[in-house]
Image (cartoon, grey):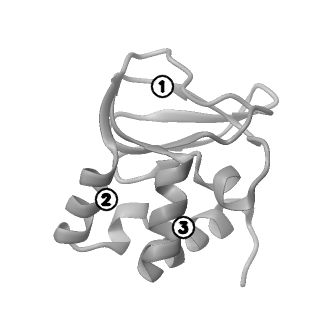
């Protein structure tokens, strides 16, 4: 499965990076919790996270991946908890910033939809 960043050129990645805020998170930290409001997303620059639903790991994600986007786009509560397995270097995007990029930039929207659909296991 392609990472989120594989959809973009280096110039486009720079644009996304400039829109967000660089944030380093320690190993063991959970920046996103299941069943909480969707107020932020993170793009992973380095490190690995565990994606957990009801306490069970359902995936691991790494550099170039985005987490937290599906709940913002779908306007619903989080369906998983994210736990840092290593120290993380991330780009933090607020829900407002993510929605602005989604609305103004068709390629960003298409990449978000593709990633969200692939994780939900649905097509189209």
Q: Are marks 1 and 2 in contact (CB under 8 Å)?
A: no
What residue is disc 1 on? 84
Circle 3 residue:
112
- Point 63% across, 63% down: residue: 116
Which residue is more in the foreground, 71 or 57?
Answer: 71
Q: CA distance from mark 2 to mark 3?
A: 13 Å
Q: Secondary structure at mark 3?
A: helix
Distance between the Cα atoms at labels 1 and 3? Answer: 22 Å
Q: Residue drawn 76% across and 73% down?
A: 122
Whether residue 1 is visible to the viewer of this picture, yes or no, is no
**Real-space Cα distance between discs 1 and 2?**
22 Å
Characterize the local packing of mark 3: few (<14), some (14-19) or many (20 or more) Cα atoms within 10 angstroms: many
Q: Position of residue 55 (x, y in %)?
A: 76, 25
Choose the circle earlier in sequence order: 1 or 2.
2
Task: Name the residue beneath numbered marker 2.
Answer: 16
N-terminal of the pair, mark 2 or mark 3, is 2
- Report the side of 100 relative to 47 (left or right): right
Q: Can you give x and y, in whole percent of width and height, for residue 101 in the image? A: 44, 65
**Is residue 123 toward the left or the right of residue 101 in the image?**
right
Q: Residue at x 43, y 80 (%)?
A: 107
Q: Which mark lies nearer to you, 1 or 3?
A: 3
The reply to whether callout 2 and callout 3 are in contact (CB within 8 Å) is no
- Which of the two residues, 73 or 3, is positioned nearer the viewer here? 73
Pointer 2: residues within 10 angstroms few (<14), some, or many (20+)? Answer: many
């Amino acid at each position: 499965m392609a990472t989120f960043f594989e959809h973009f050129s280096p110039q486009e990645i720079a644009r996304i990076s400039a829109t967000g805020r660089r944030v380093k998170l320690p190993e063991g930290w959970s920046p996103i919790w299941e069943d909480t409001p969707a107020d932020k997303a993170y793009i992973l620059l380095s490190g690995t996270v565990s994606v957990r639903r009801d306490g069970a790991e359902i995936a691991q994600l790494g550099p170039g991946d985005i987490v937290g986007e599906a709940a913002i786009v779908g306007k619903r509560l989080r369906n998983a908890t994210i736990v840092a397995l290593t120290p993380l270097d991330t780009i933090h995007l607020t829900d407002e910033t993510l929605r602005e990029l989604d609305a103004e930039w068709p390629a960003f929207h298409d990449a978000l939809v593709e990633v969200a659909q692939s994780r939900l296991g649905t097509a189209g």
